[in-house]
Amino acid sequence: MSNLVEKLPRLLVLGAGFSFVGGIFLFGFAYFTVSIPDPNAYVNSQATIIQYADGSEIGRIGSENRTVVNLAQIPMNVRNAVMAAEDRNFYSNRAINPLAIVAAVWDNVVNLGSGRGGSTITQQYAKTAFLTPERSIQRKVKELVIAIKLENQFTKDEILENYLNTIYFGRGSYGVQTASQVYFGTSVDKLNIAQSAVLASILRSPGLYDPGFKKENLPRLEARFKYVLDGMVEKKWLDKEKADAVKFPIINPRVTSGALAGPKGYVISWVERELNLLGFTDEQLMIGGYIIKTTLVKEAQEAAVFAVNKEAPTKVPENLHIGLVAIRPGTGEILAMYGGQDYLKYQFNAATQGITSGGSSFKAFALIAALEQGIPLSSVWNGDSPKVYDDGIGRPYPVNNYGGESWGNLSLLTATEKSVNTIYVPLGMKAGLEKVVDVARRAGIPESVEMVASPSVSLGSASPHVIDLANAYATFAANGVYAKPFIINEVQGPNKGILYQGRIQAQEVFKKDVMADLTYALSKATSSGTAAVVGARVARPTAGKTGTSNDNASAWFNGYTPEVAASVAFYRDDATQTLNGIGGLTSVTGGSFPARIWAEFVKKYLAKAPVQQFPEPAFIGGSEPVSYINAVPEMDPALVPPSATPKPKKKKS
């Protein structure tokens, strides 16, 4: 034991020696293996701009809100204030200052973090521009190596210019030019001494010094503000008398609005998602300076927001979602998207993320399946209520019309106009439930939406996204041409080169005569049926279908003109929560708020467009009445247990 104690000092020295040699080896290895990425690729990075189809700006992606300026455009007061705050001997010291690191440790311990940092400006630039914020020995070694190499390859002026265009000042602002506008509403060349000192103070840690972030930051900022002015005096960059006369400036309040505020945030976030799927990473989008030209039409987007604001009910539950998507028939181009009122408050896109029961929106698929089987619009069915059918595996499937109303014998055309459930269930069964599912898939309902070939499929038991039904109805508007929906039309690089070009992917999936009869039937719904409000408000040909789901959990209107197809949906987070009582209505149906919003959207968007007509109906199977009463056998009511007895207003309409 005594021998070990005697040898301990020698062992410690030997261990320290090995550590020192190991550190030298690690640093040497890093020096020859770590290269500097192109500084211009980061410093000259710009926000990615999202544009409408006409080139006007929608917004910008990411937090890299940056405008690059030359060093000559940055006043000496700004440069001196930053150096006083971060690296007072920047022009005379080396890339790494060991003494400054030791001094920083002392200041942070003794002065509780109110003193200077240990990194030189060159080190900070190396860390910000080229490295991740992780805390590790490897990253620190890379930072030191890159800092040394930067100093060997660039002048001090070049490094300072790049640093001032790179560093983060908080509030989403990167670079001193953007920070000047965010904090003081002016450009960097207009900053006075006080404003320069504030920006220099904040950049050390915006979360710790920005008074707009939290009020307790103000005393810390005022103390650091004085520290910066004292540093400028110490380096003889500012007279003592002038420094004493400098007053703390007024700082712009921190605004809660931002690039993603309001309805446009849902559009920008969806565009970013689509770009990610195309291979553009978040990092690239933040600093790449791309120009993204979308398919969105400014007039259509504005009309969508206007329509919701005008017709949506007030004083609604917080979890009520309203989604709207409009698509150009035959191309798949998304013309407008409304995902919610304010993306910053609720980051859930009601148009593309939420799913809800499609309700009677799906009756269109059953009608197409029937027309393809030669069942005509003139066919006569019995619309009494309630009815009970076999669900396919021997169990009773009770069906009830909205409100429990019995319609008697009706043509299929009138049953579509009135949205009669007790006719559409046997219609789907007669046409073939597998065929109904197939029609929905061909129209545009993706495989991700689960559909079961059961009697309920014709009444919309499946739960699609709003964009799914909008695209399906766009297929109808295009006379049977399905087109894959897309929103990215073109991606330009910072040099204006084309990096991606969107393209129309379309194919004919339904015959034109089938579509002509479908449109004729759906036009009755908007002229005198469940969506008569549309015909009353829109002075041009329209066709569409309402949808109200079980227990009033969702309400839809899906419709089209020859120029545009759009879907509007109302639903809540929880499918067990109803829309009952919203907007003062006992029951929110597709013919109420959704149809009104759709009508106002189309009316405003197409206000100046010439009126186009739908094709004339083909009358597949003839126009003479053909009886299909009892085409599908009903189940004996005696076999139906009391618990399965349908209740009024519980079925889709």
Image (cartoon, rainbow, N blue to C red):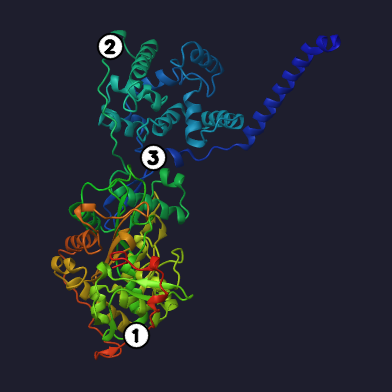
| Mark 1, secondary structure of its residue | loop
| Foreground pick, 59 / 364 | 364
Residue 574, percent from left and from top: 37, 52
Please tell me whether mark 1 or mark 2 is closer to you in this view. 1
The span from disc 3 to disc 2 (Cα, nearest Å) is 35 Å
Q: Are marks 3 and 2 in contact (CB under 8 Å)?
A: no
First of labels 1, 3 by sequence position: 3
- In the picture of the structure, the residue carrying the numbered disc 2 is 242
Query: As shown in the figure, which amino acid type bears the numbered disc 2?
Result: Lys
Q: Mark 3 points at which residue?
A: 64
Left or right, 288 with respect to 598, comes to right
Label 2: which secondary element: helix
Residue at the spot of label 1: 630
Mark 3: which amino acid?
A: Glu
In primary-sequence order, the first of circles 3 and 2 is 3
Q: In which quarter of the image is residue 449?
A: bottom left
User: Quick one: 92 or 178, which is closer to the camera?
Assistant: 178
Q: In which quarter of the image is residue 618?
A: bottom left
